[in-house]
Amino acid sequence: MDKKTVMQEAILNGLYSQDYPGHNLLTPQLVTNQADGTIWQTLQDELQHCQHFTWAVAFITTDMLVPLKALLADLADRGVSGTLLTGDYLGFNSPRTFAELMKIPNLNVKIVDKQGFHAKGYVFDHGDYQTAVIGSANFTRAALLQNTEWALRVSSRQDASLTKQLSARLADLARTSHSLTVDWLAEYEAAWRPLPTVRQRPRTSAADPITPNQMQRPALLALQQLHASGAHRGLVVSATGTGKTYLGAFAVKDFHPRRFLYVVHREQIAKKSLASFRRVIGGPASDYGLLTGNWHDWDAKYLFATVQTLAQPGTLAKLAPETFDYILVDEAHRAAAPSYQRLFDHFQPQFWLGMTATPERMDKQDVYALFDYHLAYEVRLKAALDAGMLAPFHYVGVQDYEQDGELITETTGLRYLVSDQRVKYVLEQMNYYGYCGDQPRGLIFCSRQEEARELASKFSAAGHPAVALTNEDSPRRRQQAVEQLEAGKLEYIVTVDLFNEGVDIPSLNQVIMLRNTQSAVVFTQQLGRGLRKFPGKDYVTVLDFIGNYQNNFLIPLALNQDTSRQVDRARQEVQLPPTIGVSTISFRRVAAERILQSLAAVKLDSLRELRTAYQDLHQRLGRSPLLLDFYRYGEVSPLVFAENGRLANYGQFLAKMGEPIQLSDHENAVLSFVTKELVNGKRPHELVLLKLLLANAGHRCSQEELIAALRDRGAYVSPAVLQSIDDILSLSFFAVKAGKQTRREQYGGAPLVVHNGLVDYRLAPELAAALKADPQFSSLLTDAVDTGLALSKDYDASHQFTLYQQYDRKDVCRLLNWPLDVSAPMYGYRVGDQECPIFITYRKEDDQRRNAIYDNQLENGRSLRWYTRSPRHRSSPEVQRLLATNEDGRPRVQIHLFVKRSDAVGKQFYYLGPATIQPGSVQEERLGAKQKAAVGMNLELVRPLSVRLRRLLFEEN
């Protein structure tokens, strides 16, 4: 099909009838901000494929310029440039916005002189056609990532009327505009006045109660449940800036203590916390007091103390062990220190509450043990950002300085790290990406103390006042440096891991990483230093200078809190970075290549990695973690254990960790079956039945109970799926050879569940006896079932398959309710009586391989050219079944299309939805060197492919 015809049918599909073939790029589409994509992602996609762009946008804010700069920097390397037509209407665009736009060398900014310029259009030139995105969205963070905005994306050929109209309007605007210059900006800045901000309605009274926020409400409920269980200690982990102090006040108010003690390491924090507690709890001022070096309010009902004063022997002697019935330890990650330990040894309250943002200590001190491993509640960085509790960030991964082909590594000499050329390069990048506010207030992390001191000196000499802080500096000097930074007397503090945690600099607007990422925990801690909200701080700029480091693979895992340990997913997070709330992640092309190289050299799911994850979680919980614990708290998904080819089941892994696990052959086989076949949660039906049987007396349930339980979960129910459940849990589905044994034999051969006709289900006698005799096995099996049910929440149980989720051939056989697992001989497709799954590997890595002769081209973003096996003809029975239709013209066989990018990504295919065969596209063809006959046809997706999946599966990234 020629390009002209493709364009015509795409337009007809979007504007006349969806019966015409659509096109992922060319069909007119409504673009909005939704979970599956944002207006910004659409603009990104167009920018990365255009030859030139022209934008006419009235309002621009600096909070979207950082990711734009990163993208345009890569476009500049390819020779792509653009024009931005904007204006000064209502004084909305700040002088700072214009100043930042002038830093972009491949962007020609023109100021439109027309009064009332209020356009919002983005036009992209693709050579023989153009695409316009026109609607309600200005170039602001809220409009492009969050707001309810509508924009129409429409493409037209160069000789089309719409193209001519747009070109004429843009030319008219260009004629009535002038270039953005330094002189014009100076005049504008002198006359500019900021727009009045919309203030929140003030409280009617200072005494109005403060109510818990969305993080605090579930945390308070969890603490109440912990108290009710009889526990005497608990820990709350909450990202900095999410309201821990108020949470503590609400918890104390709920408890109604006779006397309360608050412990922290600084008098300034104690004073601020006292004020916050009084605002929540109320009561006379005399109820509240301080116990610090300067204050000794011994008799206060609510006493706020510094640990330095409280832990002195003379102080403890004046306070009986039962003086306080509730003690809160703030910054609880410090509680392993000897001074805090004296408090734990002395006081005997009814309840100890620890609160911290960073429980993982690099010195391996066990903070969780101090609070009896009772992790009452946890909200980490990503959840807090999604909820809008923290200042958003714009992260940019840039390539570190390179000279004569030499890039920074772990062993690079100090002279190179602090060379004038590198310092100049770093400062240029920091200036280009900028910061939010009137001046930079930055924290720079580097790798060596000598480097920190030399960088601070050279930054200062270059006109950017900076100071180096190391562990050799006194607390007083550190505090002075922080105060100077907040006062604007310093621009940068350069440090070596000193400020990973425990420092509070709300006004920070830049975080600069000039070191190797050694730990995801440390990376997150350093990123979080700048995320506390502060008046006038709309975002934080995070620059990560990425060298040729072995640990670069940790960066996408840390940024996205990715626990999957799947290299393919980590690659996606580098090539197509997601947004987190209104925070953005960008990788410059060369920096992304460095990370991908690191990912290619590491095995994320090695036994060594799993052992480390297990030990970390064991320390947090104070016991051996189960699979469900990894789902709830772990740094590794339980799927990593379930899908690991070197582990049959989690009990086997525990045995490798030295746990006294002793399972019989039958128990091992049952646990392996549930682990390998069901824990992935891709269909909950078998798990729901097992859960009922494990929970019910006598391990029995009726079919009516099962159907009711499935419908409670929103799962589809049909005779076919009920029969499939029987086939799976009786293991008859697996009675297919897989090597020397059938998989049924590998799983022990004995059924797990016996279905007595249509009457009831019961656990097989041998399994029921094993559960009764072996509590260890019972615990592991229940854990596997519960984990599978938890993971099943990622799938839509009302349908067989969930759009854009991943499945392998074995999954598909089961979810199609087929009686046998025929995945091994299936290869590319299998035409069933009612349904036909088709599996396409888009990129063939080896031209000599059999499937390399099938050129499965994505023609229009919606249809794929696909070929049957060879030799096949139109008259072949399977081809006739595919082409057959019912009396109403609908196909008799439903096609399900599954695609993966290449064999290198593993066995999993993305489900792209049902597909139909385009009329008139079916023809016999001769393929390969031997010219064997095959039948080719166009498979058209019922639902157009999302931009993200198109880029992920079908394009060079």
Image (cartoon, rainbow, N blue to C red):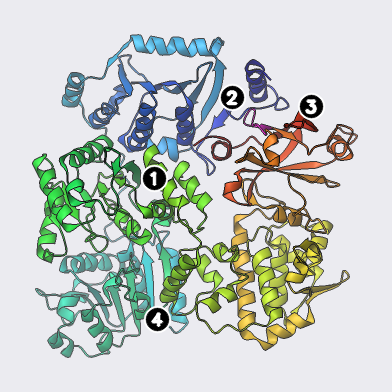
Comes first in the chain, label 4 or label 3: 4
Dot 3 amino acid type: Pro
Horizontal side, residue 632 vs residue 189: left or right? right
Horizontal side, residue 30 vs residue 823: left or right? left
Query: What residue sits 48% from the left and 58% below the top?
Result: 603
Q: Which mark is residue 594?
A: 1
Crowd class of label 1 (few under 14; some 14 to 19; many from 20; radius 10 Å): some
Measured as percent of width and height from the top left, residue 888 is found at 87, 33
Judged by depth in the image, the label closer to the viewer, 2 or 1, is 1
Dot 2 amino acid type: Leu
Q: Whole-Å distance between the Cαs marked 2 and 1?
A: 34 Å
**The stretch drawn in magenta includes residue 69:** no
Comes first in the chain, label 4 or label 1: 4
Judged by depth in the image, the label closer to the viewer, 3 or 1, is 1
Query: What residue sits 87% from the left and 69% below the top?
Result: 758
Measured as percent of width and height from the top left, residue 84 is found at 36, 22
Q: Secondary structure at mark 3?
A: loop
For the question of whether residue 482 can be seen, the reply is no
Comes first in the chain, label 4 or label 2: 2
> Up-down: is 787 above or below 140?
below
* Magenta residues (range): 856-864
Q: Which mark is residue 26?
A: 2
